[in-house]
Image (cartoon, grey):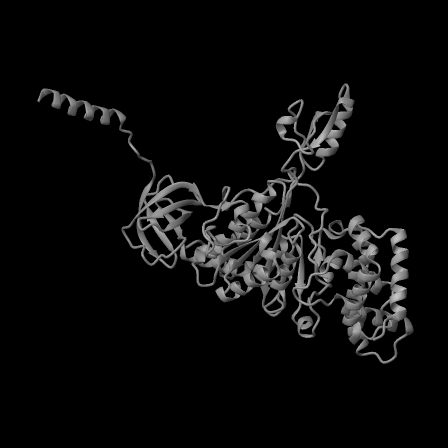
């Protein structure tokens, strides 16, 4: 009997010795009131701003408004089951979303959770939805184009990688179409696209996804959805979530493009959340920090500077890591390559060393925010805020759209502050004065309506302008390659289309490109490879256009 007691005692002792308490420390609070997607919580004394919290029923929220004794929480899910007295605990993690290549080709909600029925996502980690934008020293000049495939934009209002270019206009003027054309045109160009749908109907979002799948664009696209019937809190965080996903690619040396469709609804969602949390309002019933809301989002778009190190001459890889620097020094910033090369020259025995780029640097994040105006009023509160913090705007005019000019770009007030720096040399060669010429044509056309007798020069300018206007028209979801754009614009600006009937311009363009591809493929190939029109290739192009002009019949 004593042996049995000893054995039982020994087993108990072993269990006690091997016991490890499984515990965690977290703040716990209590819901004071809840409703309309927000909750006021008492007791979360150590919670941080933007920290995730979890309600007793499993619903996740974000600590949004930190007051002296209470915390305002925005609820990221169904708030109907959250009632007074329910416990809330902090999770110790700042609001973040999954990131990585596993998201490409998927449709997710504002929390990064899949909603496309294709199973779980293999992500590489989490990123906070809010972060400080890269500083000036960490950036480099925007000098590489994002080819939209839209002639009017690539020629007159170019977009560069790392730029913030606003698409603005009234409802039903083709804003989303421009963004989708741009996404479709990135196929095979190494640019990962993120399309953020804010406050849209789910049926419209489903059509957009189907369209992207139809044109093979989902292979390089992530769709983030915060639909109109979802909580304002989800609509508020959606663009930040999309931006965080894009930053993952930027900071691994790749190029990303994020579309926010649209920030007008984002501002409305933020206003709703702010008013429910009783934040002080600003003018026009908007919170005074609305400018800060969008600026801290759009400032995160950047083209990061390359980093360089000096390695031994026998270093075989094309790119190095920071640890491969022979002296441990990493050169960074806009002049990093120049500084590294200067340092190399000063080295004793510099013939035994070389400058190598650091792997995973030099990525970019380009932002295309969309803003909806009312009756063309670009001076309203939200449009003015966003215009002031972007690098330019593509303004779409309802009158032009209704007149059949699509894309309905008003070149008079559209602008890209990056300008020609975001164009290839070939495009600059053919479109150098096109924007000014088209703006002048539209002014002249309006004046000519009231004139009876026009001089020959004016008539010639009007005739050329009418044909260039037709050339710049483009069917939806049919992006045009760089070489085709250059050849068509060259033909138009150099007078090869001056005798073509205006109503036949579309047929002329189709036949011209078909002729060039079949009879003179070397011209387009040379433009694509060299990104410019060389003197020899220009001669060949003029001869080919003359031959086509002589044989083409309307």
Q: Tell me residue 311's x, y (percent).
A: 70, 26
The total of numbered circles placed on residues is 0
Q: Which residue is drawn at 27% across and 51% down?
A: 85
Instruction: State the residue in front, 21 or 102.
Output: 102
Q: Tell me residue 103's x, y (percent).
A: 52, 49
Assign the N terminus to one quadrant of the image: top left
Residue 35: which quarter of the image? bottom left
Q: Tell me residue 292's x, y (percent).
A: 54, 50
Q: Is residue 88 above or below residue 360?
A: below
Q: In this view, does 146 lie to the left or right of 90?
A: right
Q: Is residue 261 left or right of residue 464?
A: left
Residue, far bottom: 452
Q: Tell me residue 109's x, y (percent).
A: 47, 54
Q: Which residue is drawn at 74% across and 27% down?
A: 354
> Does the image show residue 244?
no
Q: In this view, does 293 lie to the left or right of 317?
A: left
Q: In this view, does 83 lie above or below 8?
A: below
> Does the image show residue 161?
yes
Residue 17: which quarter of the image? top left
Instruction: State the residue in front, 269 or 547.
Output: 547
Instruction: State the residue in front, 299 or 358.
Output: 358
Assign the C terminus to one quadrant of the image: bottom right
Residue, far top: 348
């Amino acid at each position: 009997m004593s042996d049995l007691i000893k054995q039982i005692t020994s087993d108990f002792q072993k269990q006690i010795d091997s016991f490890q308490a499984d515990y965690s420390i977290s703040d716990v609070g209590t819901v004071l009131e809840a409703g309309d997607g927000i909750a006021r919580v008492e007791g979360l004394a150590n919670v941080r701003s933007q920290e995730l919290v979890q309600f007793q029923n499993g619903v996740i929220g974000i600590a949004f408004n930190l007051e002296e004794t209470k915390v305002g929480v925005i609820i990221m899910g169904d708030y109907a089951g959250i009632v007074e007295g329910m416990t809330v605990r902090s999770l110790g993690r700042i609001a973040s979303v999954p990131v990585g290549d596993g998201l490409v080709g998927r449709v997710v909600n504002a929390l990064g959770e899949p909603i496309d029925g294709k199973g779980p996502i293999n992500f590489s980690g989490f990123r906070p939805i809010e972060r400080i934008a890269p500083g000036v020293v960490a950036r480099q000049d925007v000098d590489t184009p994002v080819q939209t495939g839209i002639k009017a934009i690539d020629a007159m209002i170019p977009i560069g990688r790392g730029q913030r270019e606003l698409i603005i206009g009234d409802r039903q003027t083709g804003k989303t179409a421009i963004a989708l054309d741009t996404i479709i045109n990135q196929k095979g160009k190494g640019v990962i696209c993120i399309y953020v749908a804010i406050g849209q109907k789910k049926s419209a979002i489903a059509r957009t996804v189907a369209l992207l799948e139809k044109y093979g664009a989902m292979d390089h696209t992530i769709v983030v959805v915060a639909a109109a019937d979802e909580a304002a809190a989800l609509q508020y965080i959606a663009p930040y979530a999309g931006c965080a996903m894009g930053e993952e690619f930027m900071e691994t040396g790749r190029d990303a493009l994020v579309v926010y469709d649209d920030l007008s609804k984002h501002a409305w969602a933020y206003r709703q959340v702010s008013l429910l949390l009783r934040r002080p309002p600003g003018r026009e019933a908007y919170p005074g920090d609305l400018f800060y809301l969008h600026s801290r989002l759009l400032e995160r778009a950047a083209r990061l500077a390359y980093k360089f190190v000096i390695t031994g001459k026998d270093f075989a890889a094309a790119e190095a890591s920071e640890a491969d620097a022979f002296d441990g020094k990493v050169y960074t910033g806009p002049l990093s390559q120049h500084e590294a090369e200067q340092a190399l020259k000063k080295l004793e025995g510099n013939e035994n060393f070389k400058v190598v780029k650091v792997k995973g640097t030099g990525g970019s994040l380009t932002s295309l925010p969309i803003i909806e105006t009312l009756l063309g009023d670009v001076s309203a509160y939200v449009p003015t805020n966003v215009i002031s913090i972007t690098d330019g705007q593509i303004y779409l005019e309802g009158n032009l759209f209704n007149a059949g000019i699509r894309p309905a770009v008003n070149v008079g007030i559209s602008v890209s502050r990056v300008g020609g720096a975001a164009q290839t040399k070939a495009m600059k060669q053919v479109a150098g004065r096109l924007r000014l010429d088209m703006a002048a044509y539209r002014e002249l056309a309006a004046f000519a309506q009231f004139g009876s007798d026009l001089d020959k020069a004016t008539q010639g300018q009007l005739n050329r302008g009418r044909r260039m206007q037709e050339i710049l028209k483009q069917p939806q979801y049919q992006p045009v390659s760089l070489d085709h754009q250059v050849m068509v614009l060259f033909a138009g600006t150099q007078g090869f289309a001056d005798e073509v009937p205006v109503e036949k311009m579309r047929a002329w363009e189709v036949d011209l490109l078909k002729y060039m591809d079949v009879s003179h493929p070397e011209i387009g190939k040379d433009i694509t490879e060299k990104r410019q029109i060389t003197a020899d290739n220009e001669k060949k192009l003029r001869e080919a256009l003359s031959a086509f002009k002589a044989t083409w019949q309307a």
